[in-house]
Structure formats: structure tokens, C-alpha cells
Amino acid sequence: MRLFAAVLPPGSAIAELADEVAQLKALPGADRLRWTGHDGWHFTLAFYGEVPDDVLPELQERLARAAGRQKPYELRIAGGGRFDERVVWAGGEGELAVMGKLADSTEAAGRRAGVTADAHRTYRPYHPHLTLARNRSDQHLAPFAAGMDGFKGTPWTVRELALMRSHPPQPGITGRQPHYEKLASWPLGH
């Protein structure tokens, strides 16, 4: 199973972001990008990749402990940017240092359970973001990133940590997106 730990925004935050993204999709060249679906909007804390079934119970136990050690915190979807000319993303604002500690704890939980988290986290600090679109063309992403500059969603309190399963899209079907399934969640601070 392809697994990752995440923070899932509430429906109200997703709806606000959807309104903003609708404006981005009206920009010239938007049809050349692969836009993610609303159900794919999440803040990944740690990506575990393929996790064997027999490792899952220990991973869940360790994630439950990590969630229990972290207090609930304030977050909002705000701003955005791009990773080179590959990805357009929405950012986060609020208690990001607390979120960074939760990301570190979920990565450590995976390591201790015998799962190697995504190697790119080793080389740069945690950068909370929601992927909005991917670029597989020569489309410049600066106008899309700039379109997110002034966006500030309504804050909410993050109260749980989720373990998500990623189901890759079926090969050969153009435009299909991965499907995400919440396998488990744990309240923060309990």
C-alpha cells in the first residue's frame, strides 16, 4: 500500500480554495496543466511509499503516539507558489512551527516502524503545501503562482492526524487522478 501521513482541511476551507482555483483555471494556458481534484487537497506530513501489510499495525501505533504528543493548532490555507515549472501549490499560514514538529514526528514514526519516508525531506525543511496543478508542458507557472498571492482562507483548528492510502490512477486513461482513502486518524493531544 502507498501510504502517507496528512492533515486534511475541513470542507469549508476546501470550498474557499476551490473558488480561488476556479479563477486560476480561467487564466491563459490553464488547460495545459493537470489540475488536482478537491478530494486530493491535503497537507502531506510524511510520505511513506509502499508499506507492507505486516508493518501497518506498528506504523499506526506510532502515529497514534505522535498525534497524542501534539496539541491542536491553528492553520489556514494562504498564498501559494510554484516548485520550478512543475507544480503550482497553495500554502499554509498559522502555527507552522507546530505543524513542522508534527511532520518530523510522523516521519520518525515511519522510520521507527521500519518505513523509509520520502528522501527529499532529508535535504530541505518541511514546506506545507497543497498541490493544485502539475505541469507536463512548457507552460510557465508564474502567473498561476502569482494568482495565489493574496489568497487567505478562514483559519481552522487542526485536531487530527490522518493516515492516507494513495491509489494510483488507472494506466492508459488520460486525465485520471490518484484516489486517496483515509485508513485511520487520531486526535491531536490525547
Image (tube, rainbow, N blue to C red):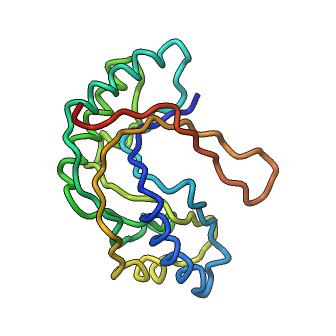
Along the viewing direction, whichever of 11 and 152 lies nearer the viewer: 11
Along the viewing direction, whichever of 16 and 92 lies nearer the viewer: 16
The residue located at (60%, 60%) in the rendering is 37
Along the viewing direction, whichever of 26 and 155 lies nearer the viewer: 155
The residue located at (22%, 61%) in the rendering is 94
> Where 40 falls versus 81 (above or below)?
above
Please state the horizontal and vertical placement of residue 118, each as a whole percent of the image: 42, 37
> Where 128 falls versus 148 (above or below)?
above
Quarter of the view holding residue 122: top left
> Where 163 falls versus 45 (above or below)?
above
Task: Answer left or right for 164 relative to 111.
Answer: right
Please state the horizontal and vertical placement of residue 171, each as a whole percent of the image: 77, 45
Please state the horizontal and vertical placement of residue 107, each as a whole percent of the image: 32, 33
Quarter of the view holding residue 133: bottom right
User: Residue pushed farthest top?
Assistant: 54
Task: Answer left or right for 76 relative to 88.
Answer: left
The residue located at (58%, 77%) in the rendering is 139
Please state the horizontal and vertical placement of residue 72, each as a whole percent of the image: 23, 45
